[in-house]
Image (cartoon, helix red, strand yellow):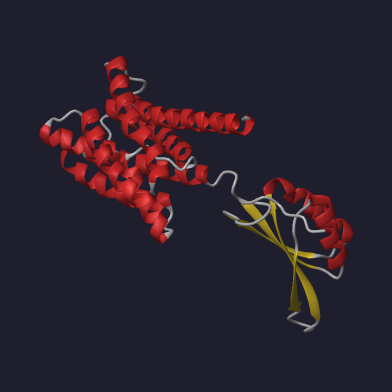
Amino acid sequence: MEAYSMKTLKLFGQICLILAGNFLCAASIAFFVLPSGLITGGATGVALFFNHLTGVSIPLFVFIFNAIMFFCGLFALGRKFALTTLIGTFFYPLSLYILQRAIGSFVITSDLFLCALFGGIGIGASCAIVFRLEASTGGTDIPPLIIYKYTRIPVSASMYVIDCVILLLQTAFSDREKILYGAFLVLVYSIVLDKLLLIGTNRTQLIIISDKTEEIKAAIISEVDRGVTLLRGKTGYLEKETDVLLSVVSNRELYKVEKIIHQIDRNAFVTLSHINEVKGRGFSSNKKYLD
């Protein structure tokens, strides 16, 4: 019963975050993009294009477009994704409609650079919140996720390409300055999205060459509780057989590991490589200790 309650509480928390992410996206569009007349990507960009051609309401078009994309995601990404995306499909255009009606002619700033910057930060942050929960704000967020599933092309990269195509559609009725700021807006939220998606997954890989590999290995295992792989190598100049240690640690643990290494062997040769993601025990799955 307690496990069921915890699962329900976790699901409720995820739904709240998905709602918050969609509302933040709608707020970024309503406060910075639409009042400034900037062109943008995503379903909103497509809606702006058709609004100019036909006069159809932007929130209404976004809702219709999101509904179509929802069914595409349902077939390609499965029911779990569809259930979480269903929230964005309805809640995002509803939030956009309510905010547009609520703020009326209110404008935070008429500076196009500030609108592009803060609008991009808001959109990128909102998409990152939703994507990390394996959901979507709907619309053009779905094709990049489908592409990632089958090709492993980063979501931010394919999203940027799709958004650039959408920007091109809007160039026919926008002046050159707003086109440039629109491209800057897309660039900002692509970078913000990419960086925020990597938060918590960045790790550091260490390669250690030393005459005291056994001591260093034992210290890393016992004091840091991280695994170490022992490789066989040969020095290039003297062609001397040597042991090479390979370990992956979190950025928080890096200083402690470096301190341990240099306390044991001041002459140890250490290289560091920053890696974006690690799969396996101790990182994406629980540690398993063997007796």
> Residue at the spot x=25%, y=28% of the render?
59
Q: Nearer the viewer, residue 145 or 100?
A: 145
Residue that extends furthest to the left in the rendered view of this protein: 54
Measuring from the top left, give residue 131's x and y in whole percent: 45, 42
Measuring from the top left, give residue 257's x and y in whole percent: 78, 53
> Residue at the spot x=25%, y=42% of the render?
68
Residue 56 in which image quadrant: top left
Measuring from the top left, give residue 45's x and y in whole percent: 26, 38
Residue 98 in which image quadrant: top left
User: Is residue 64 shown left or right of residue 128?
Assistant: left
> Residue at the spot x=88%, y=56% of the render?
263
Figure quadrant of the C terminus: bottom right
Q: Nearer the viewer, residue 120 or 253?
A: 253
Residue 69 shows in the view: yes
Measuring from the top left, give residue 272's x and y in whole percent: 68, 59
User: Is residue 246 shown left or right of residue 168?
Assistant: right
> Residue at the spot x=36%, y=55% of the render?
147
**In the figure, 228 relative to 244: above or below?**
above
Q: How many marks?
A: 0
User: Is residue 291 shown left or right of residue 87?
Assistant: right
**In the figure, 93 relative to 208: above or below?**
above
**In the figure, 246 relative to 275: above or below?**
below
Q: Nearer the viewer, residue 74 or 100?
A: 74
Residue 41 shows in the view: no
